[in-house]
Amino acid sequence: MLTFKMIIVFFGLIGMVTALVLDKMRPGMILFSVTVLFLCFGILTPKEILEGFSNKGMITVALLFLISEGVRQSGALGQLIKKLLPQEKTTVMKAQARMLPVISFVSAFLNNTPVVVIFAPIIKRWAESVCIPATKFLIPISYATILGGMCTLIGTSTNLVVDGMILDAGYKGFGMFELGRVGIFIALAGVVYLLFFSSRLLPEVRKDTVGDEHGEVDASSFHRVEAVIGARFPGINKRVGDFNFVRHYGAEVKEIKRSGVSIVDNLSRVKFREGDTLVLWADDSFISTWGDSSVFVLLANGKDTEPKAGRKKRWFALTLLVLMIVGATVGELPFMEELFPGIDLDMFFFAAITTVIMAWTKLFPARKYTKYISWDILITIACAFAISRAMVNSGVADVIAHGIIDMSDDYGPHVLLAVLFIITNLFTELITNNAAAALAFPLALSLSNQLGVSPMPFFVVICIAASASFSTPIGYQTNLIVQGIGNYKFMDFVRIGLPLNILTFIISVILIPLIWPF
């Protein structure tokens, strides 16, 4: 029987999902609004809401944003991808074979967004220089970062979120490479799939509607610039005509690319949206002024604008990254607890040390450190913990889990594992990966409790399913980034991403129960 609190939680969750799908406001504010609603009805206490903001996993995500920025500003990633790109005549498959495995490996240890932000413009310029359609590479590099993120605890924020929820529930969390026991098989299969099928499934190059229309005389000072709108752009949901872009940024909006559609006519009536790619007419100062800002996620002008740093700085940044990973991995071993009693040598410990060293050695500007943290993602994560707790407190998680078990009464936990994957994956394609994990985690816990089996297979499947956002551009920020600069249509993602989702599903439901028995 449904109680009053259950009804409130159900309506709150339905409203949250609807608002996220319709993109009514930033995900963090949507989830925070729902937590406040639950607070008003006594479903959550202030302490339960605030617990998410002090969660170790959430703080670790914030530190990893800064570490990724330090590596980015060292110039190491830009130099890496330039060495991978063949300069002679080549084929799409050969070029992808050189770059996709390396991109997956890098994204297993760094935030996916800066990897794509750095690699995408360089790869696009290279593709144009060797007369190969850039559209054959941009979606694959986004997918490669997602696949790599499945292989480690720090590969994506979702893994850290689920790990934090596991610890809060009183279970042992994931090791650094534990998810790699299944993630590496998915990544290998995914990269092979992209190598053999992406060239056939992806479109040929799509011509840019707007060119250098101001003529060769002005080309020395003004040129075409592409800018992907970020979360802090002040003109979001405002009409182009009502927002004086020239006064704010000294550039003129010539075109807006959205969902593979080029908008040129009646631009003044169009509203700016996060993830839109703006085609601008700007001078050389535009990228140098706004390239280090969170107003725009990506800026490209067809020139090399990556950070230029010395070799020593690049190697120092990479050395710190390797030491952090090795330290967190070795810190999990039993003998380390005996050597350092009272000190928890986990990822948070080593990420905190690495962040401080990077700040004091000026790998990223310490005075601007707040600019490099995606605060909306952190608020989303913190509120996700609270919403998960509300589903447990109200009994909603038990009711839904019981309903799933009743529908699959004649089947074992393997079928329920598959059902949980599908539910989580649908949510992550429609809303955000962290919100999907928040909704799925209490279901996983209730399913395992009611079945009397180990919850670990269900926890792992949440991590994989919440990250496997391949079929739509809206589920993952890197998909949105490449959609704009590649001028992809929505169906381009469905065509290439849906088989990859199915492949991930099959590998997961087969391997996870074998590696983590019920």
Image (tube, rainbow, N blue to C red):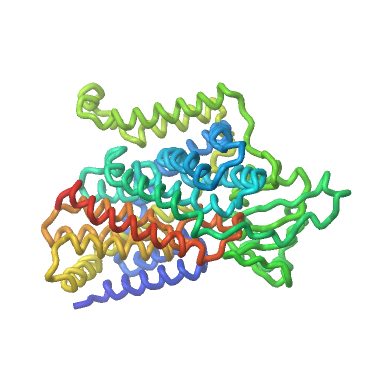
Residue 349 as seen in the image, left or right of residue 244:
left
Asked whether residue 173 appears in the rendered view, the answer is yes
Residue at point 12% right, 61% down? 451
Residue toward you, 86 or 308: 86
Q: Residue furthest bottom?
A: 1
Residue at point 46% right, 64% down? 494
* Residue 270 in the image, given as x and y percentages of width and height: 67, 70
Residue 52 as seen in the image, left or right of residue 394:
right
Q: Would you identify the image quadrant in which residue 428 lies?
A: bottom left
Q: Is residue 439 above or below residue 332?
A: below
Tag count in the figure?
Answer: 0
* Residue 55 in the image, given as x and y percentages of width and height: 35, 46
Residue toward you, 370 or 256: 256
Q: Is residue 423 above or below residue 331?
A: below
Q: Please state, as top left, top right, bottom left or bottom right, where the N terminus lies in the image.
A: bottom left
* Residue 397 in the image, given as x and y percentages of width and height: 24, 65
Q: Residue furthest right?
A: 217
Q: Is residue 135 above or below residue 316?
A: below
Residue at point 40% right, 34% down? 351
Q: Would you identify the image quadrant in which residue 72 lies?
A: top right
Residue at point 36% right, 69% down? 13
Asked whether residue 47 appears in the rendered view, the answer is no
Q: Would you identify the image quadrant in which residue 372 lies?
A: top right
